[in-house]
Amino acid sequence: MSFAESKKEILLRIDALKKEDNLDFAAHFMTLCALYAGITLLAHAPKVSALATASAIAFGLIHDYAITSRKKNLYTPDSDSFGDLVRDVHSVCQDLSIAPPPVLVDRTKRYANQTVDGISNPEVILSEPILTDMGPKQIFFICKHEIGHIVTQKNLKTSALMFLRDCSVFTACALAWTSTHLPEKKIYGALTLLTALGTQALLNHYERNNELRSDTFACLPDGDTEGYIDTLHKFYDCPMPRFDRSVASLVDYTKGNKYLVGPKRVWAWIFSDHPTKYERIKNLEP
């Protein structure tokens, strides 16, 4: 098979991943829209709904500002190994007809972490422990995984889902706050709790699915699933924040030696936005 033919096949696989992600997002988006519309109709109070929507917008702006303020802690290491990494990222992006994102390092995080910041001009951000605890090939796999998030426009989609989540929760909360009768307050209070848990579960479900699709993208263009699986093993052995570690102990986040069942699955639905290591490995196996 020639390079042109293999590249065409790879681009078709990327297009299929994007379509799958778009359909998944559309299903979650419509579900949250229906939930928000239902709670708004239940309110019978346009002012309450408008106030809740405005609160959701303000909450989103504060969240975006908090992310933007972190950029002062980002830098580009002046080392040959990091320069090689950036060139490899640019090379694979060029092969896959993707605009290469900037790769930066966050000096404040003391645990292994990587993310994509931004929507219109996304950046791949690595923590310093990623550079010290992982090998060059493993760091490259991690960068390709993050590029997968950029290709599927995860940040834009999760922002839309988070906005609908906040609108639904704030509207239910406003109903409980403005109710004058105690029975109604109890009902709307329970509705607020159920809405918060349900909408967060929907958001995390989409994010876990997107992580699996980005894992598939990380193995392109050479299809080296074994190398990426080794990277996952290494990453899950790295130190984690205290909250992630506590979640890990409940949902087999680090060990990942079995599928989640029973209460652990419910906990994962609500609080975990990443699949277990075992689920990620099973997703990559033919």
Image: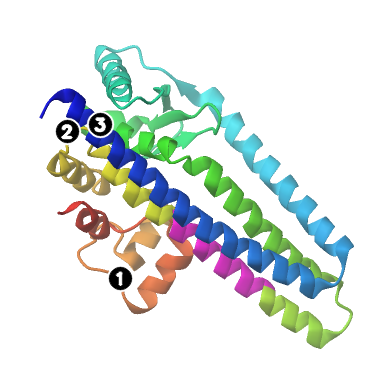
Residue type highlighted by circle 3:
Lys
Q: Which residue is drawn at 65% across and 52% down?
A: 163
Select label 2 or label 1 by which is in front.
2
**Tag 1 secondary structure:** loop
Q: Residue at x 73, y 62 (%)?
A: 170
Query: According to the image, label 2 marks what residue?
Result: 222
Q: Residue at x 61, y 74 (%)?
A: 194
Kindly report the distance in space between the C-alpha atoms of the residues bearing marks 3 and 2.
13 Å
Residue 143 on the magenta segment: no
Asked if disc 3 and disc 2 are in contact, CB closer than 8 Å, the reply is no
Dot placed on the residue nearer the N-terminal end, 3 or 2 = 3
Residue type highlighted by circle 2:
Asp
Image coords of residue 196 (percent x, y): 61, 67
The answer to whether any part of residue 232 appears in the image is: yes
**Tag 3 secondary structure:** helix
Select label 1 or label 3 by which is in front.
3
Callout 3 crowding tier (Cα within 10 Å): few <14, some 14–19, many ≥20 = few
Q: Is the magenta stretch mostly helix, strand or loop?
A: helix
Q: Residue 8 carries which label?
A: 3
Dot placed on the residue nearer the N-terminal end, 2 or 1 = 2
246 vs 134: above or below: below
Asked if disc 1 and disc 3 are in contact, CB closer than 8 Å, the reply is no
Q: Residue at x 49, y 29 (%)?
A: 122
In terms of image quadrants, where is residue 33? bottom right
Query: According to the image, label 1 marks what residue?
Result: 260
Residue type highlighted by circle 1:
Leu
Kindly report the distance in space between the C-alpha atoms of the residues bearing marks 1 and 3.
37 Å
202 vs 157: above or below: below
Image coords of residue 70 (percent x, y): 56, 31
The part of the chain drawn in magenta is 192-206
Callout 2 crowding tier (Cα within 10 Å): few <14, some 14–19, many ≥20 = few
